[in-house]
Image (cartoon, rainbow, N blue to C red):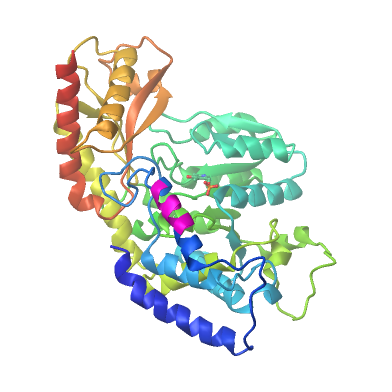
Amino acid sequence: MYAEYLEQLRESLQKLEEWRSRYGDFTPHQTVQADTGRIGEVLDRMMERLQGNYPFHHPIYAGQMLKPPHPIAWMAYTLAMTINPNNHALDGGPPTSKMEKETVHQLAGMLGLQDEYMGHLTGGGTMANLEALWVARHEHPGRGIAFSDQAHYTHGRMGELLQLPTYNVESDVYGRMLPERLNELKDRVGTVVVTMGTTGLGSVDPLDDIMEWARKNGIRVHVDAAYGGFFKLLEGDAEFPGSRHWARIPEADSLVIDPHKHGLQPYGCGCILFSDPRVGAYYKHDSPYTYFSSEELHLGEISLECSRAGASAAGLWATLQLLPLSENEGFGPLLRACRNAAVSLYSMVKESDRYRPVQKPELDILGYFPVPFIGEFSTSNISDWSKWIFEEGMNREEEGFYASLFQMDAQKLARLHPDLEIDTDRVTVLRSVLMKPEHENFAADLYRRLEEVHQACVERF
Ligand SMILES: *Cc1c(COP(=O)(O)O)cnc(C)c1O
């Protein structure tokens, strides 16, 4: 699966070796010299340890938001990493800094931003969100930040870090922010975080309505599309829900998208975009180490982080050369396959007497829960059954699968399933993140495994 690329990797590595040798040969210092036998020994031991992972590469794994990067991404990353450029400043790696600008421009284009924007890659979504909220504080000093009760947990933390009050806005039964709840906060809040694809069940906040309200009240809009951002490519699809919300993304003041989630990249690749490049003024610094050798913008001048892997930019750049950010080529069909997988698993679950879907997926994440064949149809019992199914699926020798557990408000679930008896505040359900395009053809197989595991739980009593 991956070894077939070794020849290409070796050839490319050889080209870099030729470039390196142009500067003349030298002997590595004895302190860092290692013979290949010793290296092999250490790597062998590590290969043993790495096999303690779950099979993230395989479609039987639909648990957390995890999958290996595209081969071109890890090859490009690996090759660039042997040089180890630092995109903190242009001098730290001129070619990868240029690649970063090009890829950021492609991401901005996909999201519909105008040419006037400012942005860069980050270590991840959390850093990118921090940066957006840090700018938000400069723009509205002392005013708080609102986000829904389904927003990523790091927003609360970042509010603490920035010493800004944060406000939790209730979400509806589908996990989307209730825009009418914002009104009571309008004198206290400077920025509202709109999540386009929650980490839990991929719910999409009603950006169209929130944008109307925010513009009327002079409030900033930050879109957290760390997970969902790439789904912008499906906005034109007839059956894609919420197009009117996706259409307003370009009006956001700031935007976060994670290439290391749906962009086929290794971890360490997030992205922040600001629609108004003038916010760059807040970053002014005069580090004594930064020698500004060109008139051009230094990425380090507009980033909270200092050192950043140039290899990340190389990985993303190479991937986007191969797979364009286009509706009908490259990423569009990939995202469409993931969403098809979730919708098809949803249909199978909905038809079944062994499971019920929490709700129809907006993106490619499905929430569902087992119908207990033994015991009450109550929130406590379905929580137990969810945990049994989760464990049984993962511990099977054969025909197993990997899902994840998700906790939600019991009242909300019961509003969608009125025959459910509420005897707990929270309820644990199953969750499958179908973020690999291979899931499209594997959904029926996954469902069959779910049925078998349900039956195994029935028989265990
Ligand atoms: C994953 C995620 C984050 C955090 O991003 P990291 O890259 O894990 O730091 C923030 N918001 C949302 C909606 C996410 O899905």
For this view, does 354 lie left or right of residue 178?
Answer: left
The image quadrant of residue 29 is bottom right
Q: Is residue 187 left or right of residue 226?
A: right
- Residue located at (33% from left, 19% from top): 383
Q: In the picture shown, does residue 450 fall above or below 340?
A: above
Taking the image as shown, residue 65 lies to the left or right of residue 118, namely left
Q: Nearer the viewer, residue 403 or 78?
A: 78
Where is residue 386 shown, x and y percent of the image?
30, 24
Res. 354 in view: no
Q: Front-most of 194 and 27?
A: 27
- Report the magenta residues as a range: 41-48
Give the x, y percent position of residue 265.
45, 60
Asked if the stretch drawn in magenta spans residue 157, the answer is no
Which residue is located at x 75 percent, y 37 percent?
163
Q: Quadrant of residue 86?
A: bottom right
Q: Majority secondary structure of the magenta segment?
A: helix
Q: Quadrant of the N terminus?
A: bottom left
Q: Does the magenta-highlighted stretch encompass residue 45?
A: yes
**Quick one: 20 or 242, which is closer to the camera?**
20
User: How many marks are shown on the rendered structure?
Assistant: 0
Q: Position of residue 252 (x, y in %)?
A: 56, 54
Q: Residue at x 39, y 30 (%)?
A: 406
Quadrant in the picture for the C terminus: top left
In front: 242, or 385? 385
**Residue 432 visible in this rendered orientation of the protein:** yes
Q: Position of residue 349 (x, y in %)?
A: 19, 33
Q: In the picture, residue 24 is in which quadrant?
A: bottom right
Say above or below: 23 vs 41: below
Rendered view: 407 above or below 94: above
